[in-house]
Image (spheres, helix red, strand yellow):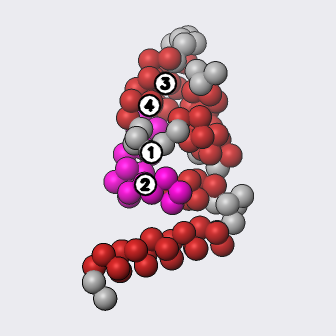
Amino acid sequence: MGLHKKLELLEYHLELMLTIIDQEKNPFESYIIRKKLSKQEVDKLMSTCEQLDEIMTKQKEEGLMWFESLFQEFKNQLPSSCDIRELINTLLISKIYINLMKEFQKYCR
């Protein structure tokens, strides 16, 4: 079996696996698979969220209330396959960076 055929088979099996994953229990993992995000893209996304969450927390302690610049930075760092509204909702449902995503949700409207 050639490399191209093996890749096609692997992609097909991934699509099948996605149908058996409980998407309600694992919404973020399901999102990663659906959007075909690489480990590096997910690691970068999580690192970006961690940094922005720390900045936002510090800014809130200083009395700042507007975080549109953080939202824009987040938006600019997303992989092209990601829809920002869908990602924010998925992270909220998954209880990942809840405070940060609640703030970012305000700028998606």
Residue contact at pointers 4 and 1, CB within 8 angstroms: no
The magenta span reads 33-51
Characterize the local packing of mark 3: few (<14), some (14-19) or many (20 or more) Cα atoms within 10 angstroms.
many
- Name which of mark 1 and mark 3 comes first in the sequence: 3
Residue contact at pointers 2 and 1, CB within 8 angstroms: yes
Residue 49, image x, y percentages: 46, 38
Q: Which mark is residue 71?
A: 3
Would you name the residue on which mark 1 appears?
81
Where, quadrant-wise, is the N terminus in this rendering? bottom left
Q: Amino acid at mark 4?
A: Phe
Characterize the local packing of mark 4: few (<14), some (14-19) or many (20 or more) Cα atoms within 10 angstroms.
some
Q: CA distance from mark 2 to mark 3?
A: 20 Å
Q: Amino acid at mark 2?
A: Leu
Residue 55, image x, y percentages: 44, 26
Q: Amino acid at mark 3?
A: Phe
Would you name the residue on which mark 2 appears?
37
Would you name the residue on which mark 4 appears?
74
- Name which quarter of the figure residue 99 lies in: top right
Can residue 91 be seen in the rendering of this structure?
A: yes
Secondary element at image label 4: helix
Q: Is residue 97 left or right of residue 52?
A: right
Mark nearer the viewer, 4 or 2: 2
Secondary element at image label 3: helix
Residue 106, image x, y percentages: 63, 22
| Front-most of residues 61 and 70 | 70
Q: Amino acid at mark 1?
A: Ser
Mark nearer the viewer, 2 or 1: 1
- Name which of mark 4 and mark 1 comes first in the sequence: 4
Which residue occupies 62% across, 45% down?
90
The total number of labels drawn is 4
| Front-most of residues 85 and 53 | 85
